[in-house]
């Protein structure tokens, strides 16, 4: 008879394999990470997620680093949900990355958007001014970091400003 406790269960999974209803957190960086930083960050995020727990239960999670500018953590909550303590642990981890690399990852009062293939980063106030000056429009591709599930991330994260909360500024 097969003993399921003897089968190693990997808690870090490929982000793409997470279910559509997986919870996500998006951390946008105020600059693009260098290639060396991306390699280091991928290693430490993997290590963090391998040991990430909620009330002693391992959490099944994955991550993505689109544009070498965002850290997106996804959590499959079918086995265990994030608790206040586990969320605090992830925020503390992200704060450590901010300190190590001298970047902002937790400031929600900034906007990332595309200008061609380049990802720009502005304060919300500057983005509002750009909207009034018609420097950005309803067609400007923005990153809606308020999406909460992997399905929303896949379908509504990178959208024209008219399809996001950014619409009120353009």
Image: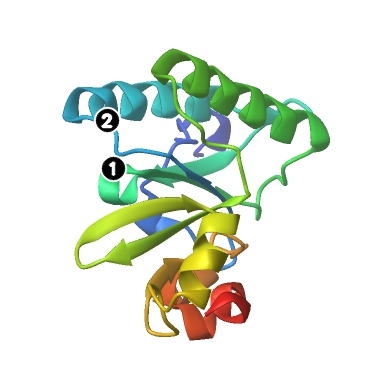
Q: Position of residue 146 (x, y in %)?
A: 61, 62
Q: Secondary structure at mark 1?
A: helix
- In this rendering, the answer to whether 18 lies above or below 116 is above
- In this rendering, the answer to whether 5 lies above or below 71 is above
The front one of 87 and 30 is 30
- Is residue 105 in view from this perspective? yes
- In this rendering, the answer to whether 72 lies above or below 52 is below
- Is residue 144 in view from this perspective? no
Which residue is pictured at 42% across the width and 79% down the height? 134
Which residue is pictured at 35% across the width and 26% down the height? 41
Looking at the picture, the colour scheme in use is rainbow
In terms of sequence position, does the residue under pointer 1 or pointer 2 come before the other? Answer: 2
The front one of 129 and 88 is 129
The front one of 92 and 23 is 92
Which residue is pictured at 62% across the width and 62% down the height? 148
- Kindly indicate whether the residue at mark 2 contacts the one at mark 1 (C-beta within 8 angstroms): yes
Q: Is residue 117 left or right of residue 143?
A: left
The circle on residue 38 is: 2
The circle on residue 112 is: none
Q: Residues within 10 Å of mark 1 (few under 14, many from 20)?
A: some
Q: Is residue 86 left or right of residue 2?
A: right
Q: Which of the 4 quarters of the picture holds residue 133?
A: bottom left
Which residue is pictured at 36% across the width and 47% down the height? 14
Q: Position of residue 158 (x, y in %)?
A: 40, 70
The circle on residue 68 is: 1
Counting every numbered tag in the picture gives 2
Q: List the single residue furthest toward the top.
A: 100
Q: Secondary structure at mark 2?
A: helix
Q: List the single residue furthest toward the front.
A: 133
Q: Position of residue 50 (x, y in %)?
A: 49, 27
Separation of disc 1 and disc 2 at Cα? Answer: 7 Å
Q: Position of residue 30 (x, y in %)?
A: 43, 39
């Amino acid at each position: 008879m097969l003993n399921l406790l003897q089968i190693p269960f990997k808690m870090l999974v490929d982000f793409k394999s997470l279910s559509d209803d997986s919870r996500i957190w998006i951390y946008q960086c105020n600059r693009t990470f260098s290639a060396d930083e991306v390699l280091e960050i991928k290693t430490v995020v993997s290590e963090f997620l391998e040991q990430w727990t909620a009330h002693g239960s391992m959490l099944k999670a994955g991550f993505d680093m689109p544009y070498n500018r965002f850290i997106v953590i996804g959590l499959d909550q079918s086995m265990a949900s994030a608790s206040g303590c586990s969320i605090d642990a992830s925020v503390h981890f992200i704060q450590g990355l901010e300190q190590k690399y001298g970047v902002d990852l937790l400031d929600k009062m900034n906007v990332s958007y595309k200008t061609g293939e380049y990802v720009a980063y502005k304060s919300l106030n500057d983005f509002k001014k750009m909207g009034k000056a018609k420097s950005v429009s309803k067609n400007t591709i923005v990153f809606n970091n308020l999406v909460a599930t992997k399905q929303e991330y896949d379908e509504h994260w990178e959208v024209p400003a008219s399809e996001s909360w950014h619409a009120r500024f353009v």
